[in-house]
Image (cartoon, helix red, strand yellow):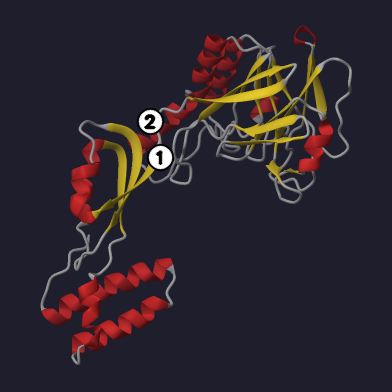
Amino acid sequence: MKLLHAADFHLDSPLSGLTAEKSTRRRGELRDIPARLARLAKEEGVDLVLLPGDLFDGERVYPETVRALAGALEEMAVPVVIAPGNHDFYHGGSPYAEAPWPDNVHIFTETGLQAVELPGLNCVVHGCAFTGPHREDDPLVGFAARSDGRLHLLCVHGEMGRQGSYAPIAPESLARSGAAYAALGHVHAGMSGREGKTLWAYPGCPEGRGFDELGEKGALLVTVGPDGAQARFVPVGRRQYRIETVNVDSFTEILPEGESPDLVRILLTGESRFAPDLAALTARAAPRFFHVELRDNTTLPTDLWARAGEDSLTGLFLREMRARLEGAGEDERDKLLLAARFGLAALEGGEDVRP
């Protein structure tokens, strides 16, 4: 059997930090995730689709988003199983309860494990739903699949661990389950492991939404056979969030020839007496990326700090700033470095640049 496992679409996310026009474009690209997955399911000839939750970002869901998701799931033309998560938990007013869903879609509605029997695939999918934003009990406690010759799978939204606020799943619970594969949702980075004979995996989110969701994103194609389950990552994201580090003197080297589709944060490093002109550098980089932002991580030159030993007002100032920097946290350090630059400029008649 071949199945498609995807989760954590977070459709209709607000996508703060972008311009209104680019936020609209990104929401449209997120809304297109189900259609891309439908094409992938057809191309790969999958038999089953498992979607363990957080397909929607919250209770505010646009009707066209629900229609787009339902249409794509119907187009898959194979059984689709959804386990609502903590962001899109099941309740009487949720899209899962109110919207018309295709006949091939099965949605779990209870916190206790339910079973979807698929005789045509000689398979049973076990899963449950969040019915609120938090859940502190292990949804797999006491569960063990029957040895009845059928293939048993899990589709659950939760976090790996013995304790937590989002349906913590203990490793021993997975090992005891006897399921061939556990399709999990909630963690936005891809990861997998094995407990007993059960392969468990998180596909991660199919599209990054911020600089805490870096790199290539996608879904998992899983093959389940007599020798167990094997998962293969397939990228489906339109764009990537990336963080690039570059010496301020080599800034132009990081700029692509054409326009990159990605959203990039550039960290400027190296030594610089004066703060880089972030506004000017951002304006230069902006046409080369879908979105770009710069952070100043440069430091004062080493030889300048050496002047802290001078018997002068500049030396006294540098000694004081260095003492403060030694015990400062990261956020305070940035402010102190900027203050050191402004102070030196004032003391020695220079000019500092900062937007």
Report the residue at 38% width, 30% height from top: 25
How far separated are the C-alphas under marks 1 and 2? 15 Å
Most extreme residue toward the front, as rendered? 227
The residue under label 2 is 25
Q: Indicate which disc, 1 or 2, sits on the residue closer to the N terminus.
A: 2
Report the residue at 20% width, 74% height from top: 303
Of 45 and 76, the residue lying toward us: 45
Residue 317 position (above or below residue 117): below
In the image, taking residue 96 as reference, residue 321 lies left or right, namely: left
Please state which amino acid type lies under the numbered disc 1: Tyr
Residue 350 position (above or below residue 268): below
In the image, taking residue 275 as reference, residue 185 lies left or right, namely: right
Q: Say what secondary structure mark 1 lies in.
A: strand
Residue 348, position in %: x, y?
12, 80
Residue 235, position in %: x, y?
48, 26
Q: Say what secondary structure mark 2 lies in.
A: helix
Please state which amino acid type lies under the numbered disc 2: Arg
Residue 267 position (above or below residue 138): below
Report the residue at 56% width, 39% height from top: 188
The residue under label 1 is 241
Most extreme residue toward the left, as rendered? 349
Where, by quadrant of the figure, is residue 256 drawn?
A: top left
Residue 260, position in %: x, y?
29, 33
In the image, taking residue 167 as reference, residue 297 lies left or right, namely: left
Which image quarter holds the N terminus?
A: top right
